[in-house]
Amino acid sequence: MSLYLTSPGSRKKLIIFLVLVVGKNNVQVYVDVKGKMMEISGPWNINKKTAANGDWRSGRWWEYGYVRRLELPGDADLQNSEAFLSNKDDYSFLEIIIPKINSKNKF
């Protein structure tokens, strides 16, 4: 499975991220408000088994999931951000909408 991230669409009032995640799986979106970072993560294949001894760390742990971290601009209003996930037949489509802080209120 792959994670494809398009360039963020930038309008006057919104920042839009469009993410295509191949395969049906769980997608998590974590936002660090202080650091202005967004993390998109999820499992590659939720049906994989652990290693023979039952410890995921002794197996190929990097095959179990993905993580993408995005640094957001300083004028992103993370408190009011929204994420929408739609599942199709063999892929998931994630849309993240982040409003921009009004530049007049910054100073």
Image (spheres, rainbow, N blue to C red):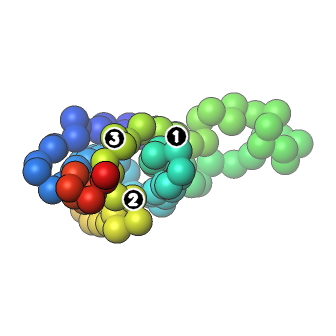
Q: Secondary structure at mark 2?
A: helix
Identify the mark at residue 73; answer none if there is no mark. Answer: 3
Q: Residue 20: x, y in percent?
A: 28, 47
Secondary structure type for disc 1: strand
Residue tagged by mark 1? 66
Q: Which residue is mark 2?
A: 78
User: Left or right: 94 with respect to 14?
Assistant: right
Does the residue at mark 3 contact the one at mark 1 (Cβ under 8 Å)? no
Q: Is residue 12 left or right of residue 20?
A: left
Q: Residue at x 51, y 40 (%)?
A: 67
Residue 14 in the image: state x and y as whole percent: 18, 55
What kind of residue is marked 2?
Answer: Leu
Amino acid marked by disc 3: Pro
Farthest residue to the left: give it: 12
Q: Earlier in the sequence, mark 3 or mark 1?
A: 1
Q: Nearer the viewer, residue 76 or 54?
A: 76
Label 3 crowd bin: few (<14), some (14–19), many (20+), radius 10 Å: few
Q: Residue 20: which disc?
A: none
Question: Along the horizontal axis of the image, is 62 left or right of 26?
Answer: right
Occupied quadrant, residue 62 = top right
Horizontal relation, residue 18 to residue 30: left or right: left
Residue at x 46%, y 46% (from the top left corner): 36
Q: Residue at x 15, y 44 (%)?
A: 10
Residue 31 to residue 39: above or below: below
Q: CA distance from mark 3 to mark 1?
A: 23 Å
